[in-house]
Amino acid sequence: MPFCPQCRSEFRPGFDRCSDCGVALVDTLPPERHPEPHYELLMATADPDLLPLVLSALRAADIPYVADGGEAASLLPLGPGAGTSHGGVAVEILVPADRLAEAEALIEAGVEVTDELPPELREED
Ligand SMILES: [Zn+2]
């Protein structure tokens, strides 16, 4: 059954062009584009040191995120030390729902130990 790839109308066999769009019909419609993923709250933090660590961990794992601190925090360049401008303001970090478990595991496994010293630099007990 021919379909218009533009308006997704279905046509009877024999038509080869959409009467509305003027585009060539196709036998099967391409899959619809996925809607924006549903974002879930990963964590909220007012810790200016923790935030960049979490975001860089998410970036390293290729997990998209939204950092919502009220003043377009996600648009700020978050290089080393950049999080300090958010002192005292809780920033909510959201990730796609289907990546939430992955992101949580990442935070638990990685963020706290990011600044751990290599064994040779640790102080003796
Ligand atoms: Zn059409």
Image (cartoon, rainbow, N blue to C red):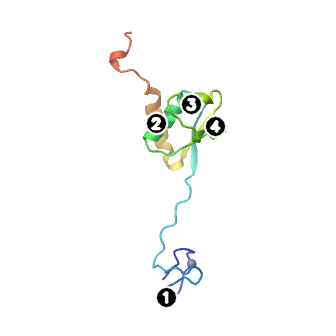
Q: Quadrant of ligand 1?
A: bottom right
Q: Which of marks 3 and 4 is nearer the N terminus?
A: 4
Quarter of the picture containing the C terminus is: top left
Residue 7 placement (x, y as % from top left): 57, 75
> Circles 3 and 1: CB distance less than 8 Å?
no
Q: What residue type is labelled 1?
A: Pro
Please determine whether, in this image, residue 102 is positioned above or below residue 12.
above
Residue 37 in sight? yes
The residue beneath circle 4 is 69
Q: Which amino acid does label 2 sit on?
A: Ala
The residue beneath circle 3 is 83
Depth check: 62 or 40 in front? 62
The label on residue 57 is: 2
The CA span between labels 1 and 2 is 53 Å
Depth check: 13 or 125 in front? 13
The CA span between labels 1 and 4 is 54 Å
The residue beneath circle 1 is 13
Q: Which amino acid does label 4 sit on?
A: Gly
Depth check: 30 or 98 in front? 30
Where, by quadrant of the figure, is residue 85 drawn?
Answer: top right
Q: Residues within 10 Å of mark 4 (few under 14, many from 20)?
A: some
Local SS, label 2: helix
Residue at point 49% right, 82% down?
A: 2
Local SS, label 3: helix
